[in-house]
């Protein structure tokens, strides 16, 4: 596997760091989120749009573009099993926190 991250200025590759997981961009219109905008207020917008804005993508997003786990906070995940931290799943409300 030799995927690279789609976030501008991110040089992460799966081949270099096998601990990274990757996430495809959410479908447009499927989920709404309420991230805090630059004025400190919650803004109700489409989750895909929130990802694009937060990461400053600056181009059309294709179905092949991926965002790596290092752009998300630990609280953006839940674990399939309480006993195991091996398989973490990105929450439906997650928006990248690190660009």
Image (spheres, rainbow, N blue to C red):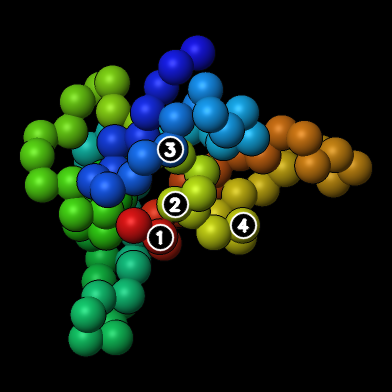
Residue that appears at 34% across and 45% down: 10
**Location of residue 15 with respect to 38 vertically, above or below:** above
Residue that label 3 marks: 12
Q: Around disc 3, counting alpha carbons within 10 Å, would you say few (fewer than 14), some (14 to 19), or many (20 or more)?
A: some
Counting from the top left corner in percent of width and height, residue 31 is at 34, 46
Which mark's residue is nearer the viewer, 4 or 2? 2
Disc 3 to disc 1, C-alpha distance: 13 Å
Q: Quadrant of the C terminus?
A: bottom left
Q: Label 2 belongs to which residue? A: 71
Q: Earlier in the sequence, mark 1 or mark 4?
A: 4
Residue under the point 10% across and 35% down = 60
Tell me the residue that label 1 is attached to.
Answer: 98
SS for dot 3: loop
Mark 4–mark 3 distance (CA, rounded to whole Å): 18 Å
The residue wearing badge 4 is: 74
Q: CA distance from mark 3 to mark 2?
A: 11 Å
Any part of residue 69 in sight: yes
Locate residue 21, reporting x and y percent. Answer: 55, 33
C-alpha span from label 1 to label 4: 11 Å
Where 66 sits versus 9, above or below?
A: above
Mark 4 or mark 3, earlier in chain: 3
Mark 1 surroundings within 10 Å by alpha-carbon count, few (fewer than 14), some (14 through 19), many (20 or more): few
Mark in front: 1 vs 4? 1
Determine whether the residue tagged by mark 4 lies in a helix, strand or loop: helix
**CB under 8 Å between discs 4 and 2:** no
Which badge, 3 or 1, comes first in the chain's sequence?
3
Could you tell me if the residues under marks 1 and 4 are in contact, i.e. CB atoms within 8 Å? no
């Amino acid at each position: 596997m030799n995927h690279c991250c789609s976030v501008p200025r991110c040089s992460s590759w799966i081949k270099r760091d096998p601990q990274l997981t990757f996430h495809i961009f959410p479908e447009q219109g499927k989920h709404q989120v309420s991230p805090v905008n630059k004025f400190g207020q919650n803004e109700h917008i489409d989750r895909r749009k929130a990802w694009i804005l937060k990461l400053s993508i600056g181009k059309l997003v294709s179905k092949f573009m991926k965002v790596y786990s290092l752009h998300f906070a630990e609280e953006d995940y839940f674990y399939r099993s309480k006993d195991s931290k091996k398989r973490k799943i990105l929450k439906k409300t997650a928006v990248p926190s690190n660009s």
